[in-house]
Image: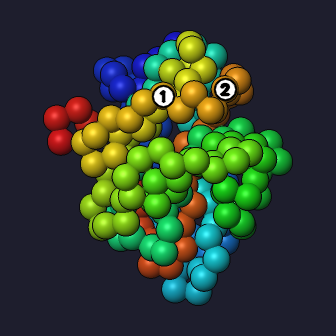
Amino acid sequence: MPNLNDTRGIPKTLYVWDEKACGSNLIIEDNGKIVQAEEDCIDHQCVRGTIALENKGTFEWDIIIEKNCSWSWIRVCESKNFNYETFAGNQPTGRVLGSGGLCNSTSGFYYCLPFHEDGARITVHLDMNKRTCAFTVNGKKYREVSEWDNLPSKLYPVVSLNYPGRFRIQPHQKNV
């Protein structure tokens, strides 16, 4: 199984947003690397990454908030029964980290310091061998989210944003 932190042999084109799994008021740009909310995107909408993260392996990717919005949400989720037209945190098929530092699945809890600024970098560390997830926010790595037990065997990167949000997805870059 590929390790998305090790880009050898893995096309960088896998680190892109999926235009077919995207809210109607979101625009995919820069060959799929950037998602931006249109001006009339008042409520949060979601977009999913193209690559399914499944079975075994360790997967790491960065989300760079190039332009912050009212709240930014980073998520891993299952693809089934997911509504891209609405906020990710209100949906039962995934786990979400918000820019206020709050994690949410069935109940919310504070996990990290807030990240409301343009240029914030969030690294997702998904270990499908142990079915665990952790985050690094602006260079500070936080603990595994033990409250997110029993992660499904197939997950996707997802973000939720509204206007003027603009987020980039890319392979994790260790020395940035």
Q: CA distance from mark 1 to mark 2?
A: 10 Å
Coloring scheme used = rainbow
User: Which residue is labeled 1 in the image?
Assistant: 144
Q: Percent position (x, y) of residue 176?
A: 18, 42
Q: Closer to the N terminus: mark 1 or mark 2? A: 1
Q: Which residue is mark 2?
A: 149
Task: For mark 2, give the secondary structure.
Answer: loop
Pick whichever, 174 or 35, lies toward us. Answer: 174
Q: Where residue 94 appears, x then y in whole percent?
A: 69, 43
Q: Which amino acid type is marked by label 1? A: Glu
Tag 2: amino acid: Asp
Between 104 and 77, the residue placed more toward the observer is 104
Question: What residue is drawn where x is 43% and y is 30%?
Answer: 143
Q: Is residue 92 visible?
A: yes
Residue at left offset 62%, top offset 70%:
44
From the viewer's perspective, tell me whether residue 157 is left or right of residue 15: right
Horizontal relation, residue 139 to residue 164: left or right: left
Q: Position of residue 29 (x, y in %)?
A: 43, 64
Please determine whether, in this image, residue 149 is positioned above or below residue 19.
above
User: Mark 1 packing: few (<14 Cα in 10 Å), some, or many (20+)?
Assistant: some
- Between 21 and 69, the one lying in front of the other is 69
Residue sitting at the far left:
175
Point 36% across, 26% down: residue: 5
Q: Is residue 74 visible?
A: no
